Amino acid sequence: MIQGISIYEILTVTTVLFFIGVYGFLTRKNLISMLISVELILNASVVNFVVINKYLYPDMLQGAVYAIFIIAVAAAETALAISIIINLYRQINSVEVKDTEVMKH
Amino acid sequence: MDILSLFIVVPVLTILVLVFTRNLKQARLVSVVGSLVQLGMAINLVFAYLKERAINSDIMVFTKDVVWFEQFNIHYTIGVDGISVALLLLTAIVVLAGVFISWKMYDLPKEFFISLIVLSIGVYGFFISIDLFTMFVFFEIAVIPMYLLIGIWGSGPKEYSAMKLTLMLMGASAVLLVGILGIYFNSNADGGALTFNILEIAKANIPFEVQKLFFPLTFIGFAVIGALFPFHTWSPDGHASAPTAVSMLHAGVLMKLGGYGVFRVAMYLLPEGALHWSWIFIILSVIGVVYGAFSAIKQTDLKYINAYSSVSHLGLVLFALLMLNKTAWNGAILQSLSHGFMTALFFALIGMIYSRTHTRDITKLGGLLKVIPFISVIYVIAGLASLGLPGFSGFVAEMNIFVGAFQQEGLFMRIATILSVSVIVITAVYILRVVGIMLMGPIKNESYLTLEKVTWYERFGILLLLIPIVGIGVAPLWLSDMILESLQPFIQGLL
Amino acid sequence: MDISYIILIPIIPLVVFLLLGIFNQKIKPGISGYVGVFGLLASTTLSFYAAYQYFFVYGKVDGVFQTFSEKTVWMNFTDTLHIDMGILVDPISVMMLVVVSVVSLMVHMYSRGYMKGDEGYTKFFAFLSLFTFSMYGLVLATNLFQIYIFWELVGVSSYLLIGYYYTKTAAIAAAKKAFIVTRFADFGFLIGILIIGFYTGTFDFETLNNPEGSVILNWAATSFMGLSVITWALILIFIGGAGKSAMFPLHIWLPDAMEGPTPVSALIHAATMVVAGVFLVARLFPMFYFVEDGFALNIVAYVGAFSALFAAIIAITQTDIKRVLAFSTMSQLGYMMLALGVSGYEGHEGVGYMASMFHLFTHAMFKALLFLGAGSVIHAVHSNYLKDMGGLRKYMPITNITFLIAALAIAGVPPLAGFWSKDEILVAAFEHNKLIYYVGVFVAGLTAFYMFRIYFGIFWGKERTYDHKPKESPLSMTLPLIVLAFLSVTAGFIPFSEFVTADKAGFEAHLNYPLAAVATGVGLIGIVLAWIFYKNENSLSDRYAKAFGPLYKWASDKFYFDEIYMFVAKKILFKRVSEPIAKFDKKYVDGTMVGIGNKTVLTSKKIKGIQSGKVQDYAFAFIAGVVVLALVFIYLWPN
């Protein structure tokens, strides 16, 4: 609970953060940038979990636990994604989305 | 093991043995033995049925019921009456003849015979099922090997034909499935559980609105495989591309599933719907009858002629089924049998002529009576049977249909009847045209002078098909009475 | 009367047929000829025995010939309608047994000589037996359906025998034509049978023909377009009969059918099968007579009279001797039909019926003789055409004499057979319908004329140069000629009116001297005219032919009926119906189905771009979908 700041302000910030992530994911051509955008989305939801837990059910910890859970998963996912991207880079010398189309064939 | 399930088990065993065969000789030996056993079973079944019928007055005898899928009340329910017994015998004979005709199938023989026997499993299963869902499953089993048989062993534009045939029949199956499910979900109209059992459903009073909705779906679903105009176009192309034995089985047996299904499911379960819609299907079937015959006049490819003739003859079956009386139905069943033998015989003969002359174009053939007399004479006999000459099965069937159709009063029915009777003239035209051009006349090609004489296995296959044609034609009483008796409960359900 | 042995009469030829048919390749030709002849000899003996038993021993009870029948159910249609197979013995069926047996036996014997050396010798005898079996079955039929069954079988035997020389294009075409034209007529016949079956509930002749039976008494119960349905049925059945009996306008197949071997023409297309139509009308005569006061019978009379005249005119102009005989057959069949048409029922009223049957009997004898004689001539000179013949009387004395006897018989010269039967026909016509009588007399004159035209043309006139010197045929061929000539002389003295009458009671027939004199006179005029024109070659006939101008041309082209039928069949049915249907099927019906397939492929091609494989496109679709759904759920979804 932070004095002077209601849940609405914080939720507004996380929403903005979420949609920045979505926007980034849809428009970035670079796989790394897209990965960063996905991180933004995840972080927005992590903040939401924590905030909603704190403001609505202060006696409980599930939100916080979930946040940690997401951070852990996100770390693993990032590691995996980065490794894929590096592998891809070794193959096609590019991290551009449009160049990954070769994988279709 | 009960007498009916054997019809599934024996072909399955045959297939299992076939898997281990190594060459054509072994494969055809196993197939011949398997089909001979089936023919024996079918003949045995006829006698067993006649004996059973004397003491048992149930609609279906030799019934057996095994729960298959309890949640939806799907059972493996089997049983036969006179109609299915007759059709089983037809199937057994045609399959055996088909195996004999494929004596020289050098191309992937094992796989060919396996597909052929899978097809026959579907057909046998279809004819013995009383459960709608089981019936539908067997229907699909019968249709699908067709794709492989035509696509792999066919000739000409075989992929196209196989695809067309399969897609149209699958489309029909989709329509049919909707119809069957419609029946299923209304099978508890009088309370009780939903059921797929035909005999149970027949006792329920399915509301008229429902019948009106689902009759056309069920009818068309089955009638497509019975070559109802205008859904018949898969059949000429399919026949033309299919190898001989497949054409035989296809036209001889598979197309009978349509008429049988219409009769067993659409007519029996949805009689009020049938009455309501019959006019439109009568128009379509009469068009099919006349139109098929006229189309056949102009064709030059033997297989096309036969395919269109099948459209015409099977149109007559559907027409008779729509006449909703015992005589016409008897005619429809007899016509199914008769056409089955006749058309299988035709395709067998066409296959023999083609394998010798390498053409099916009648304008290139001529004077075959002189060089291959046995095949030609049988072709003439088959032709005469096809145009409804007394003494052959076609006459018996057609007369039942016409007399039955004439029981229907009213100008519309009369005109439809007279139009369908007119087919006896048109049929004569196209049959005699082929006989005149192909078999008689001078020999058109020097190389035909040295055609190979008929072999013993071909002779056997031909006679196997010819005997029932003549048998039914000369002494139809026992068969026709057996069928008439089995029709009794159906006609009572209608009234 | 025990009639069960009669079943053997048809069975024997059937067995012979199966024997010769199945072992076609294995039997030596010499043996197969004997098998055929002796088989038929057995049937003939039985037929004569049956005739004797029936007419003189058992048949007549209280002055009326009884009808005996034995039958068994062959197939059930409904509880009441069924097809029976059996034998029906009454005066006309017994008479027909005799006719069929005699002619068939003669033809069998004759064929042993005529077909000698032909490669299909055994096959020929097999077909002859098949035909004889079918014809016996036809005349013994107990009901309409049985007669229809054998009707079709004689039709197919006729097809097989016309097309016997199957490598000849003309023979194939003729066989096909004969079958299809008669099949077309049978279409009418079948509908007629269906009508009778539906409205009367029976096919059985005895029930249908009973003058006091419910069928005849209740003919007016149902009507259609102003006529009783039974009348319609009878008209349709008559169409069937007209097809078989080559009545106008369904006659076109008969002349072409002469492409078959000559013994076949004698047996099938002169003496037996073609009279099946007459027999059919006679078989149903009570119905024809009583229903609607004989409306259908009038049609029979006029069709018969017209055909008789029409065919006689054409016969004068033909140059193929077999075709002349064919048209003569058609003309005489018309005679029989018109006699039936003008007949009454009871006692002397029924003289037309009696005369028709009498003429059928005598005509079978002398027409078979004419054909066999013509065959003998053709055998000798290897041509069918008059222009290749002449002066043959020196070379073929037996053929000459027997042919002359037959020609005199058909011309109606007393006391030969044709005179008696023709006279009765003219009496019947005179008593009932003057117009038909005059036609009949005129036709009698024409008959004498064209018959003697070919007689003089063949046996007199100038000799041609022959490749081989023509010689008399062997005994196997001349013996039947002599037997038939004997019958042609004597058959007229049979007191037919005591045996075969409409009411089966029999009556005393008297020669009507004025009418007989007129008929004979007309016949003699015809003969004399033919003498003047054709005895010696002269240009008289050509000049007269020129004088008739177009009429002669039309007649010699058979009034273009072949062309009309060809036009309808080829130009209209083939070109305008069949071909468009075949095209329609390929283009539209099949096209629609194929089109559905192609459209599916096209559509899938169009929408497959959506599946681009780009993550961002999918993500965009996903998010857009979420947004849209959110909006829908929030604002548009009703609570």
Image (cartoon, coloured by chain):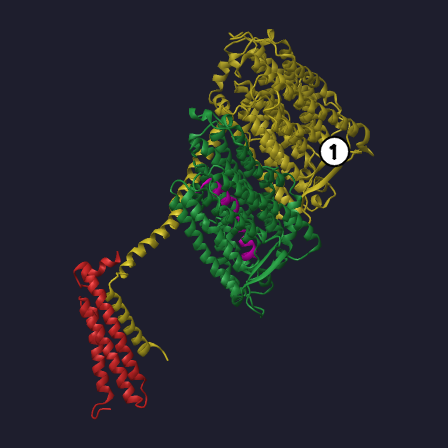
Chain colours: A red, B green, C yellow
Q: How many marks?
A: 1
The answer to whether residue C493 is above or below residue B358 is above
Q: Quadrant of the C terminus of chain C?
A: bottom left
Residue at position x 52%, y 20% in the image: C318
- Can see residue B437? yes
Location of residue B106 (image quadrant): top left
Q: Is residue C537 magenta?
A: no
Residue A63 coordinates in the image, percent (x, y):
30, 84
Please provide the residue range marked out in magenta: B242-267
**In the current view of this chain or complex, which residue is farthest to the bottom?**
A3
Residue B79 coordinates in the image, percent (x, y):
61, 56
Location of residue C441 (image quadrant): top right
Front position in the image: B453 or B86 = B453
- Can see residue C442? no
Q: Is residue C306 left or right of residue B152?
A: right
Q: Main secondary structure of the magenta part?
A: helix
At label 1, counting other C-alpha atoms closer than 10 Å, the crowd grade (few under 14, some 14-19, many 20 or more) is many
The answer to whether residue C537 is above or below residue C154 is above
Q: Is residue B258 magenta?
A: yes
Chain under callout 1: C
Q: Is residue C623 left or right of residue C254?
A: left
Residue at position x 51%, y 52% in the image: B122
Residue at position x 20%, y 92% in the image: A4
Q: Is label 1 in a helix, a strand or a loop? A: loop
Which residue position holds label 1?
Answer: C90
Residue B139 coordinates in the image, percent (x, y):
50, 54
Front position in the image: C132 or C564 = C132
Location of residue B399 (image quadrant): top right
Q: Quadrant of the N terminus of chain C?
A: top right
**Residue type beneath disc 1:** Asp
Front position in the image: B211 or C38 = C38
**In the current view of this chain or complex, which residue is farthest to the right?**
C62
